């Protein structure tokens, strides 16, 4: 049995010394970047090449891309399962143990994708195998985000938790940048070579990245708050069930907060590549713009997290969600200009401003909603269930809308809906920052 602790930040333990915290931050960010590199590779490949290689050819290239994004969405369907599994492991046996296993599964699945035969060679077995490996990626990703966040936030001083917790998202941004850079590099190959074997290189390179990430994870110290809870006998035997019983509202709030953040991320960073291709923008222009936007967002999210320590989590999160609704149509107007600076401006505003304000604040906000002994499970459940209908389905829905209407405006409306859901959710969320 365990003793209930308050879910607010005021009930949390003393932070670790600054030097030790810096080591934890660096190790957590590096390990997370290795894992998210693997996960994001699929999104880029789905937008650029998987449609024609793994799904039956049709008259409209968007149909093949739609099939690739359907498999992309299935990875998100698997994420709640990963959240439940690794939330249980993380709350019972430690955050570090859970993170080592998520990296092992992710690395193995990604390397396997690089070895797959295509539809031309084995027919329907190719997309079937791709789906299985994508599901494994989803399971691993479902346990990764919560663990990466908690390793930092549970060791950070309460008055700086927003800033330090935002560092956990640099791993996500770093992984995306690495995956985009890898595809940008192999796209320099002649087109035939890129389609035949060049696309495989970023996936096969994950073997080296996996080995480095595993070394980093195995030398990562355990969360101080988990250690304190373990010593005090406060570890739950069924943390997922306890999280649902004790924090149903907080799980729903996490889902609502996640809607705009996750839904917009994959529209700005994955679907934008599809739309750029649709309107005739060079892949290199879009990929470079996405990388530039992500670089700036990695700086911006730290600033947003720091601002949340000063004025509160809710006001900063509201800036991001409200800005999303205002930028929805202008984002596509800027892309349609075919002007490289304006295209990059659209991507920077979408990521560093709208998404950055939300993702920079989300780690501290949602972790402060739950008590220590069920925090991993509670955060993972809310975060990953929302990822199905937000990030997982958004590129699929957006591509289907583009295929049906041959224009951007339905996708802009989708962005506005995501923003509205999160703005309403904020109205039911209490401020978690300590006064």
Image (cartoon, rainbow, N blue to C red):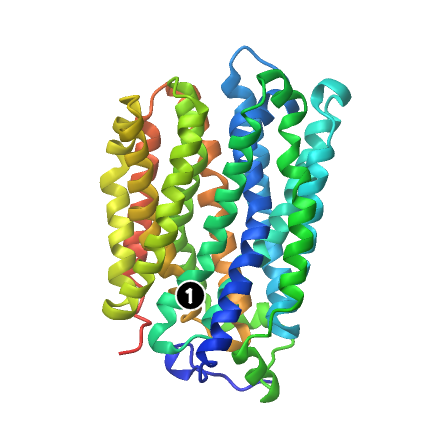
Q: Secondary structure at mark 1?
A: helix
Task: Determine if residue 385 is in view.
Answer: yes
Q: Position of residue 433 (x, y in %)?
A: 31, 73
Picture layout, residue 72 above or below residue 23: above
Lateral position of residue 103 relative to residue 269, left or right: right
Residue that numbered label 1 is attached to: 165
Q: Residue at x 51, y 66 (%)?
A: 378
Q: Residue furthest right?
A: 122
Lateral position of residue 426 relative to residue 173, left or right: left
Q: Position of residue 113 (x, y in %)?
A: 69, 36
Q: Nearer the viewer, residue 175 or 238?
A: 175
Lateral position of residue 415 relative to residue 248, left or right: left
Q: Position of residue 18 (x, y in %)?
A: 44, 77
Q: Residue at x 42, y 77 (%)?
A: 7
| Picture quadrant of residue 46 | top right
Q: Residue at x 58, y 81 (%)?
A: 227
Q: Quadrant of the C terminus?
A: bottom left
| Picture quadrant of residue 166 | bottom left
Task: Determine if residue 401 is in view.
Answer: no
Q: Residue at x 48, y 49 (%)?
A: 174
Q: Quadrant of the N terminus?
A: bottom right
Q: Residue furthest bottom?
A: 232
Q: Position of residue 341 (x, y in %)?
A: 28, 30
Q: Residue furthest top?
A: 59
Classify mark 1: residues with Cα within 10 Å, few (<14), some (14-19) or many (20+).
many
Give the tally of numbered discs.
1
Q: Nearer the viewer, residue 151 or 55?
A: 151
């Amino acid at each position: 049995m365990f003793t209930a602790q308050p879910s607010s930040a005021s009930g949390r333990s003393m932070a670790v010394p600054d030097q030790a915290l810096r080591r934890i931050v660096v190790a957590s960010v590096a390990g997370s970047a290795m894992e998210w590199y693997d996960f994001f590779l699929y999104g880029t490949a789905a937008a650029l090449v998987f449609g024609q290689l793994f799904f039956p050819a049709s008259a409209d290239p968007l149909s093949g891309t739609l099939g690739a994004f359907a498999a992309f969405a299935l990875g998100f369907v698997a994420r709640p399962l990963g959240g439940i599994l690794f939330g249980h492991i993380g709350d019972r046996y430690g955050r570090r143990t859970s993170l080592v296993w998520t990296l092992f599964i992710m690395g193995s699945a990604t390397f396997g994708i690089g070895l797959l035969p295509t539809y031309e060679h084995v027919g329907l077995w190719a997309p079937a195998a791709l789906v299985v490996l994508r599901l494994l990626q989803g399971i691993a990703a479902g346990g990764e985000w919560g663990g990466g966040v908690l390793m930092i936030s549970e060791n950070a001083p309460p008055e700086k938790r927003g800033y330090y917790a935002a560092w956990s998202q640099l791993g996500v941004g770093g992984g995306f940048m690495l995956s985009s850079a890898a595809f940008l590099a192999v796209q320099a190959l002649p087109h035939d070579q890129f389609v035949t074997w060049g696309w495989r290189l970023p996936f096969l390179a994950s073997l080296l990245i996996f080995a480095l990430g595993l070394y980093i994870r195995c030398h990562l110290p355990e969360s101080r708050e988990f250690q304190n809870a373990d010593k005090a006998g406060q570890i739950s035997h069924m943390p997922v069930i306890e999280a649902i019983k004790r924090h149903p509202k907080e799980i729903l709030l996490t889902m609502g907060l996640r809607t705009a953040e996750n839904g917009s991320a994959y529209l700005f960073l994955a679907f934008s590549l599809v739309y750029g291709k649709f309107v005739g923008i060079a892949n290199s222009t879009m990929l470079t713009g996405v990388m530039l936007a992500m670089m700036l967002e990695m700086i911006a999210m730290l600033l947003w997290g720091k601002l949340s320590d000063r004025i509160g989590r809710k006001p900063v999160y509201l800036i991001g969600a409200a800005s999303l609704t205002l930028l929805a149509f202008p984002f596509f107007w800027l892309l349609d200009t075919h002007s490289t600076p304006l295209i990059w401006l659209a991507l920077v505003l979408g990521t560093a401003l709208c998404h950055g304000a939300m993702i920079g604040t989300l780690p501290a906000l949602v972790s402060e909603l739950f008590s220590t002994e069920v925090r991993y499970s509670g955060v993972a459940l809310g975060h990953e269930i929302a990822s199905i209908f937000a990030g997982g389905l958004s590129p699929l829905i957006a591509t289907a809308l583009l295929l049906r209407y041959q224009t951007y405006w339905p996708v802009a409306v989708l962005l506005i809906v995501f923003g509205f859901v999160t703005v309403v959710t904020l109205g039911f969320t209490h401020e978690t920052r300590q006064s």
